[in-house]
Image (cartoon, helix red, strand yellow):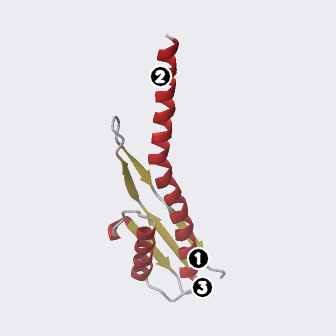
Amino acid sequence: METLKLILGIAVIVAVIYLGIEVVPPYYSNYEFQDTISREAMDSTYKPISEDDIRAQIIADAKQYDIPITEPNVKVVRSGGMGTGSVSIDVKYDIHIGVPIYPFDLHFNPSSTNKGFY
């Protein structure tokens, strides 16, 4: 009985470590990507840059973090003029976690809005 408890305990610890190795990197990438989106929204508020250029930059940044997004996944809204308007960026994407017993998807929705001074 003691051997069975030991084997089960080790199996649970190994399963938790394996699940952590699979799940933590997508969350960390999303955290860094959220920071990039916030910085891009702030910078784009004060630059004469179009919505399409902002979208292209967000997609390029996502590739840097191995985040699979396409153009329809990125919503950019720019209102007002440079420095006086606002920029809103909203991204939706899913990451598939293929663990052997129960594969699942993680759903992420990083976004940021920045308003100008005036």
Identity, as a three-letter code, of the amino acid under mark 3: Gly
Judging from the image, what secondary structure is the residue with disc 2 in? helix
Q: Earlier in the sequence, mark 3 or mark 2?
A: 2
Name the image quarter holding residue 91: bottom left
Residue for point 47% across, 86% down: 49
Q: Earlier in the sequence, mark 3 or mark 1?
A: 1
Residue at the front extreme?
3
Residue at the bottom extreme?
48
Q: Which residue is mark 2?
A: 7
Q: Earlier in the sequence, mark 2 or mark 1?
A: 2
Neighbor class of circle 2 (other Cα within 10 Å; few <14, some 14-19, many 20+) is: few
Q: Nearer the viewer, mark 2 or mark 1?
A: 2
Q: CA distance from mark 3 to mark 1?
A: 10 Å
Label ID, residue 42: 1
Compared across the picture, whether 70 is left or right of 44 comes to: left
Judging from the image, what secondary structure is the residue with disc 3 in? loop
In terms of depth relative to the viewer, which is nearer, 71 or 63? 63
Residue at the right extreme?
117
Q: Position of residue 84 (x, y in %)?
A: 60, 83
Neighbor class of circle 3 (other Cα within 10 Å; few <14, some 14-19, many 20+) is: some
Judging from the image, what secondary structure is the residue with disc 1 in? helix
In terms of depth relative to the viewer, which is nearer, 66 or 50? 66
Residue for point 42% across, 51% down: 107
Q: CA distance from mark 3 to mark 2?
A: 63 Å
Identity, as a three-letter code, of the amino acid under mark 2: Ile
Q: Which residue is mark 3?
A: 83
In terms of depth relative to the viewer, which is nearer, 64 or 21? 21
Q: Quadrant of the C terminus?
A: bottom right
Residue for point 53% across, 75% down: 40
Identity, as a three-letter code, of the amino acid under mark 1: Met
